[in-house]
Structure formats: structure tokens, C-alpha cells
Amino acid sequence: MSDFTSLADHFLIAMPALQDRFFGQSLVYLFEHTQDGAMGLIVNQPTELTLADVLTQLQPDTEPPARTQSVPVYTGGPVQTDRGFVIHPPTQQYQSTTNLGALSITNSQDILHAIAGNGGPQQYLIALGYAGWGGGQLEDELKNNTWLSCPASHAILFDTPASDRRAAATASLGIQLSQLSHLAGHS
């Protein structure tokens, strides 16, 4: 596989034919992609949970700050749904932060407490679970027109409402969502 090209720091845009309950209509931020596989977070599917709910589960005897009731938690994917991830700019390090270059990903509780106390990163997205692909699996899905890919945009990730992120990523390719059904193949 000498022609392998990593799609890390790219978005995966679900094509209309993808009707999976997790991935249908999804936009995935791919934070790792090697010949051995890929990992990403769905970034446009908020759950009914908020940061306040998560903090209450972590520390049941402590009342979370009121502002945390409006901080959404996203469905990151179907793998390890009890595990939390926070995507944020690489300006701060926490107990378990991996610098990905353009962004960092943290999966330790200290970042949640920092966000709750207004001392965390200014931009962030909190997700439970992640999406994972084995070696060659994502490449096969791309060949079968399951996904479109484009470079990730911090503006789409952090400044665009969740319901508009998939359309914004598609528009960055010069395509409207309504055009995607004409591009999708059938397998």
C-alpha cells in the first residue's frame, strides 16, 4: 500500500445511501488514519445529555455549575460509548491529551472540570464513544461511495450549529447536500 494517504484531520461526510443508525446523516471528524485503521468522532449528533449530566455522574455529591446545563454532549460513535473524548485546539495539555497537530483530543476528566470552571479551552466538542475502522475498512467504504471526505475546518467544527455542520462540510467541496443523492453509487 505505498500509495496510502492519511485522511487524519479530515471530515467524512455520510452519503445519503448510508442508513446506519449511528452513521446515517453524520459528519465524522477523523483524528487518526493509518494503514492499520482509523478513528474519528461523529460531530453533528448531540445527545440529550449535557456536561452537567456527565459531571453529576462523575461527582454525584457536587452540584455542577449552571452554565454546564447548556453544554451539549455528542454521540461520538458506537465504540466504547461510556468513554468520553474532548476535541479542542492544542493550546492546553491535560492528564490524557494527545496532540494531533491542528487539534488535540483529551479523554481525562480534568478537562471537563476545567471547562465547567471556565478554565478550559475556549473551543471544544465533547463526545461519548468513537467511530473506528480496521485496516483497509475505511478505504473500502470510500471506494463504495459510503463517504465523501474533505479537509476539516475548525469553523465548521466549533462555530457552526450541529444541524448545519454536514451541509457546511459538503459546501466546502462546492457541493450542496441535495446533490449528493446524484453522486452516490449503489453496491
Image (cartoon, rainbow, N blue to C red):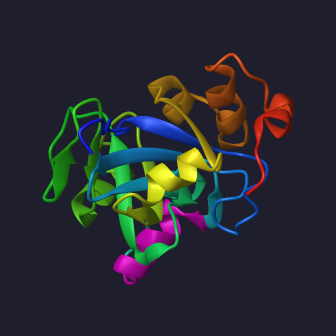
At horizontal 37% and vertical 75% (from top left) the residue drawn is 62
Q: Find the residue positioned furthest to the bottom.
A: 60
Asked whether, in this view, residue 18 is left or right of residue 153, the answer is: right
**Image quarter of residue 179:** top right
Q: Quadrant of the C terminus?
A: bottom right
Image spot of residue 1 (x, y percent): 27, 45
Magenta region includes residue 168: no
At horizontal 55% and vertical 46% (from top left) the residue drawn is 142
Q: Nearer the viewer, residue 123 or 21?
A: 21
At horizontal 35% and vertical 78% (from top left) the residue drawn is 58
Asked whether, in this view, residue 128 is left or right of residue 104, the answer is: right
Dominant SS in magenta: helix
The answer to whether residue 101 shows anywhere in this view is: yes
Image spot of residue 50 (x, y percent): 55, 62
At horizontal 51% and vertical 24% (from top left) the residue drawn is 155
Image spot of residue 141 (x, y percent): 56, 54
The answer to whether residue 63 shows anywhere in this view is: no
Residue 33 position (above or below residue 50): above
Q: Find the residue positioned furthest to the top.
A: 174
Q: Nearer the viewer, residue 49 or 143?
A: 143
Q: Which residues are magenta?
A: 49-61
Residue 23 position (above or below residue 157): below
Asked whether, in this view, residue 3 is left or right of residue 41, the answer is: left
Residue 79 position (above or below residue 29): below
Q: Nearer the viewer, residue 156 or 38?
A: 38
Q: Nearer the viewer, residue 138 or 101?
A: 138
